[in-house]
Image (cartoon, grey):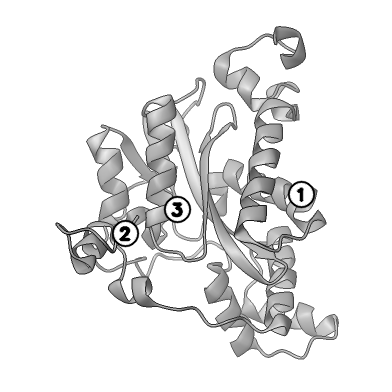
Amino acid sequence: MIESANQQLSISRQCKLLDVKRSSYYYSPKPIKPEDLELMRIIDELYLRDPSSGSRSLSRQLRRQGKKVNRKKVQRLMRLMGIEAVYPRPRTTRPHPQHKVYPYLLKNLTIERPNQVWATDITYIPMARGFMYLVAVMDWHSRKILSWRVSNTMEPAFCIEALEEAIDRYGAPEIFNTDQGSQFTSNAFTKVLKDNQVAISMDGRGRCQDNIFVERLWWTLKYQYIYLHSFDTGKALRRGLAWWIQYYNQERGHSSLDDKTPDEVYYGLPFPYAEAA
């Protein structure tokens, strides 16, 4: 989103408007060691099975698999992957000292129609020689994936792109729910929601159950697709994700939706989808 040839806005000004650190724009990432990439892939699988696993537990599980690793290294890799153990605890810290955290609005709320509540989250995606981050915007009522983006950094820009695309294509929701990650508490991200008169809801810190449907999406995506394939490039990953998300939206029935697809529920199509086409 940053245009180096822009004559009206400097790189510094563009970074500030997008809530991107200027150092991140100029940063040239160092290659990750193959052995670390293997550890990150295993950590991702273990964490997906049990999000309450912290660095101590993951270190023990890795050592049981014959990996020579200490807790400090696991902590470093978890930070790089953007994950932390999920468990009830007092909220003693804020995601970013200058970002506002909003209350959780979905407790005891009956979600009964499309565009009533949207949610988003970021997940780590392992690749053959590296990794990417995936963000997706989901409609809670239908489980439809409305938009998505992949990025090689955790800066807010790709999350903002996904949000703007979803609003452009489907209109604004009544409520938008996120976790307390700095990408979603950033002024640039919340401004898009405020400009579209969307009520902002945020999970309690350390409570993955508050955004359970997106967490289930990550489990389904990874175990039914990502872990079964190897992607050499970002282009290959994007092409694969585009195919799977179309399949997920249009062909994959959900038991929680009476075996309807997300598109059938979102658009109110007859069941099954094939007969309506």
Cβ atoms under marks 1 and 2 closer than 8 Å = no
Please name the residue shown 65% across and 54% down the image.
237
Q: Which quadrant holds residue 186?
A: bottom left
Asked if 169 appears above or below 34 in the picture, the reply is: above
Q: Where is mark 3, residue-wise?
A: 179
Going by the numbered disc 3, the residue's amino acid type is Asp
Looking at the rendered structure, the secondary structure element under dot 3 is loop
Residue 54 pos. (x, y %): 62, 74
Please name the residue shown 79% across and 47% down the image.
224
User: In front: mark 2 or mark 3?
Assistant: 2
Dot 3 or dot 1: first in sequence order is 3
User: Would you say 262 lies left or right of 274 here?
Assistant: left
Q: Which quadrant holds residue 87?
A: bottom right
Task: Report if residue 64 is visible in the image.
Answer: yes
Q: Residue furthest left?
A: 8
Q: Which quadrant holds residue 258?
A: top right
Going by the numbered disc 2, the residue's amino acid type is Ile
Please name the residue shown 26% across and 61% down the image.
5
Dot 2 or dot 3: first in sequence order is 2
Location of the N terminus by quadrant is bottom left
Location of the C terminus by quadrant is top right
Q: Residues within 10 Å of mark 3 (few under 14, many from 20)?
A: many
User: Would you say 163 lies left or right of 267 here?
Assistant: left
Between 9 and 15, the residue placed more toward the observer is 9
Going by the numbered disc 1, the residue's amino acid type is Tyr
Dot 1 or dot 2: first in sequence order is 2
* Label at residue 225: 1
